[in-house]
Image: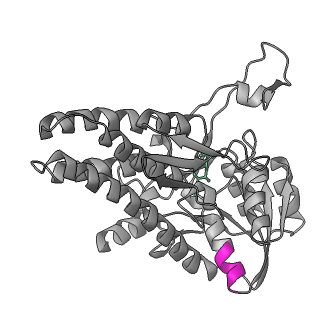
Amino acid sequence: MLPTIEWRGEYIRMIDQRKIPAKLEWYICRGYKDVIKAIRVMVIRGAPAIGVAAAMGLALGAKVIRTNSYASFERQFRKMAEEMTRARPTAVNLKWAVDRMGLLVQRMAGVPVDQIKKALLWESEKILAEDIDINRRIGQHGLKLVPKESTILTHCNAGSLATGGYGTALGVIRAAHEAGKKVEVIADETRPWLQGLRLTAFELMQDNIPVTVIADSAAGYLMRQRRIDLVITGADRIAVNGDVANKIGTYQVAVLAKENGIPFYVAAPLSTIDLKIRSGEMIPVEEREGREIYCFGKRQVGPVGVNAFNPAFDITPGKYVKAIITEQGLIRPPYLREIREIFHRK
Ligand code: MRU
């Protein structure tokens, strides 16, 4: 599998996910504004991946700040960090990565600016390497939930492309496959960006993991026919009460799973849990342009002038989530208590 994002000396390159599977093309970022644009227009997407991109973007931007004064460097860095945070609002991993880079700058107060720039670059590489390691650990913990033979439904793409590598929900599926379990995947196509059809199916086919794509609206039908054993999705932000923000359509999948007695799991790193957010209603949900709904690619398919509403994420109440699979193990209800405990131990 190609890396989702990487340093290439003076610049960053990332796979242009808008073009997969038709083309495997690199998108080059030479400045932090290129990274912000790449996140906004979905060249790179998926909560952990945009966190990594934001960290690298800030290191890239820091490189060209022309000053020897710490105070001036810090001011310019902070301005850039604020801009980066606004690139997309829902995935907390982006803000988490920006804050981590900002904290490093603060801790290095008084250190020569050139050294801070180098440290930011290393920190961004560390965030990427840690993310891949975390995903492998999520995979190992999640593996235990997967029966020896099972059909798993997933929504959107929480795979290698959505992270530094390996994936969260797809990390669990990969780990189960690597452990010799006979897993099959049902991938919701995931309108309107078709991350399930274009990215999840692409990744799984590369790994020779059997995958079948369905229209989003077919999930309930398959569940009722007992053709799904479990559901695993990723998350963009998790509130301390266990409410989960994830790709639009996740909520209805979770409700259908509950109705049909099918376990619904969320796989996510601990950095996706936002300790400042008490419940799902507090999570900002990105609304994207209506044209993503009434156009298919560049082609308008809806009537000219039609109204469209395009929330990119929804909130699944914690009561529908059987467990959250993290790098430190499973978190089970009651989430409020268990989440506090896991962070207390950290
Ligand atoms: O709009 P996207 O493609 O960035 O949405 C991605 C998702 O909703 C993923 O499920 C989530 O970020 C988890 S990725 C490991």
**Image location (x, y in percent) of residue 101:** 31, 50
Residue farthest to the front?
A: 9
The part of the image, by quadrant, that contains residue 204 is bottom right
Question: Main SS of the magenta segment?
Answer: helix
**Residue at 81% in and 68% down:** 228
Toward the viewer: 43 or 225?
43
**Residue at 55% in and 42% down:** 28
**Residue at 20% in and 53% down:** 115
**Vertical relation: 178 (above or below) 217:** below
Residue 236 in the magenta stretch? The answer is no
Task: Decide if residue 189 is in sight here.
Answer: yes
Q: Which residues, given as a range, are shown in magenta?
A: 174-179
Q: Is residue 19 left or right of residue 11?
A: right
Residue farthest to the top?
A: 305
Count of numbered circles on the image? 0
Toward the viewer: 167 or 244?
167
**Vertical relation: 133 (above or below) 6:** below
Q: Quadrant of the C terminus?
A: bottom left
Residue farthest to the left?
A: 110
Toward the viewer: 75 or 234?
75
**Image location (x, y in percent) of residue 221:** 88, 57
**Image location (x, y in percent) of residue 227:** 86, 69
Q: Quadrant of the N terminus?
A: bottom right
